[in-house]
Amino acid sequence: MSRRPFKQEPSKTGWWLKHPRYIRYMMREISAAFIGCYVLLLIVGLLRLSQGESAYNEFVAAAGGPAGFIFALITMLFAVYHTYTWFQVTPKAMPLVLAGKPVPGAAIVAAHWFGFFVASAALWLLGS
């Protein structure tokens, strides 16, 4: 009589911890959840603004506390990571051909970063 060897069941929740590529992928996915929560926070801020000055001031006081600052900082870090990973995959998702020759991936990524910094500077100047 033959016996089958014991085979351990694969982890259903920790599969992504076994390879750095999967960890980066899951961090990107988690970043979208944080950014989505931040967008909901901004929508609540707009709702409170529509309810009057005192309601909006209460919202600003609550969001401006230590927990709000830490949440905004984490969300900003995730947004930068999300942007970085998207710009790195852009040459594969959007290959460009100019004059019959493919544009190097590094040039596409550099153009995206340039546009990002120009747009950020323009928004910063408009806000100040």
Image (cartoon, rainbow, N blue to C red):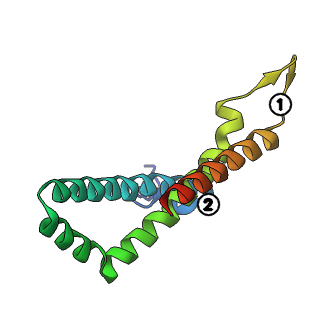
Camera-side residue of 44 and 70: 44
Camera-side residue of 16 and 24: 24
Q: Earlier in the sequence, mark 2 or mark 1?
A: 2
Judge from the rendering whether residue 60 lies leftward or rightward of residue 71; answer left or right. left
The circle drawn on residue 103 is: 1
Q: Position of residue 45 (x, y in %)?
A: 24, 59
Toward which corner of the image does residue 53 lie, by quadrant?
bottom left
Q: Are marks 2 and 1 in contact (CB under 8 Å)?
A: no
Residue 10 appears anywhere in the view: no
Q: Residues within 10 Å of mark 2 (few under 14, many from 20)?
A: few
The circle drawn on residue 92 is: none
Where is 42 relative to 112, above or below?
A: below
Where is 99 relative to 38, above or below?
A: above
Mark 1: amino acid: Val
Residue at the (67%, 29%) spot, across then down: 94
Where is 95 relative to 60, above or below?
A: above
Residue at disc 1, secondary structure: loop
Residue at disc 2, secondary structure: helix
Residue at the (27%, 59%) spot, across then down: 41
Judge from the rendering whether residue 90 lies leftward or rightward of residue 63; answer left or right. right
Using the numbered discs, state the Cα–Cα distance from disc 2 to disc 1 in whole angstroms.
29 Å
Q: Residues within 10 Å of mark 1 (few under 14, many from 20)?
A: some
Where is 125 relative to 90, above or below?
A: below
Residue at the (73%, 44%) spot, across then down: 109
Q: Position of residue 39 (x, y in %)?
A: 33, 53
Residue at the (31%, 76%) spot, across then down: 64
The residue to which callout 2 is attached is 20
Q: Position of residue 12 (x, y in %)?
A: 38, 55
Mark 2: amino acid: Pro
Q: Nearer the viewer, mark 2 or mark 1?
A: 1
Q: Position of residue 99 (x, y in %)?
A: 87, 18
Residue 14 appears anywhere in the view: yes
